[in-house]
Image (cartoon, grey):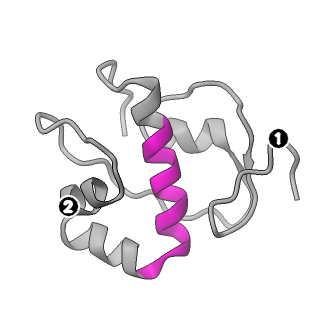
Amino acid sequence: MPEDPTLSPELRRQIARFVARAWSDESLRREFERDPRAALAEAGVDWPSELAPPDLPDQPGQAIDLESLESSAGGALGTIGTVSCPTGCFSGGQSA
């Protein structure tokens, strides 16, 4: 997904966390596939109505740092931590 300058850093963080949750929650992923806007809204993500909903990236087979996850969700914000478990936990920059 190309970076969109209208996405705030907070919205990018919300999307990154949503993606991590969707990777570990099959029902959330299916809900997103059926109705992305409703799934995002239910998760507390206020996605701009003028933008198409983001794609849900494939889950990597290995740990991914938060910068990469946020980049795939709409823009890099700098390395904040590391996603190293399928439940979306953030390990504070230490890989597990």
Spatial separation of the CA atoms under disc 1 and disc 2 = 31 Å
Q: Is residue 15 magenta?
A: yes
For the stretch drawn in magenta, what is the main secondary structure?
helix
Q: Amino acid at mark 1?
A: Gly
Q: Quadrant of the C terminus?
A: bottom right
* Picture disc at residue 93: 1
| Front residue of this view, candidates 62 and 7 | 7
- Quadrant including the N terminus: top left
Q: Amino acid at mark 2?
A: Ala
Asked if disc 1 and disc 2 are in contact, CB closer than 8 Å, the reply is: no
Secondary structure at badge 2 equals: helix
**Residue 87 falls in which quadrant of the image?**
bottom right
Residue most extreme to the left: 50
Residue extending farthest to the top is: 5
Q: In the depicted view, which residue is nearer to us: 13 or 65?
A: 13
Residue drawn at x 44%, y 35% is: 12
Task: Provide the residue designation for mark 2.
Answer: 38
Region of the chain picked out in magenta, as a range: 13-26
**Residue 53: in magenta span:** no
Quadrant hosting residue 41: bottom left
Secondary structure beneath dot 1 equals: loop
**How many numbered marks, from 0 up?**
2
Mark 1 Cα-neighbour bin, 10 Å: few <14, some 14–19, many ≥20: some
Q: Residue furthest bottom?
A: 27
- Residue 93 percent across, percent down from the top left: 82, 41
Q: Is residue 74 above or below residue 57?
A: above
Q: Where does the image place residue 2, in percent across and percent down from the top left?
A: 36, 32
Residue drawn at 38 percent across, 72 percent down: 29
Q: Residue at x 45, y 80 (%)?
A: 26
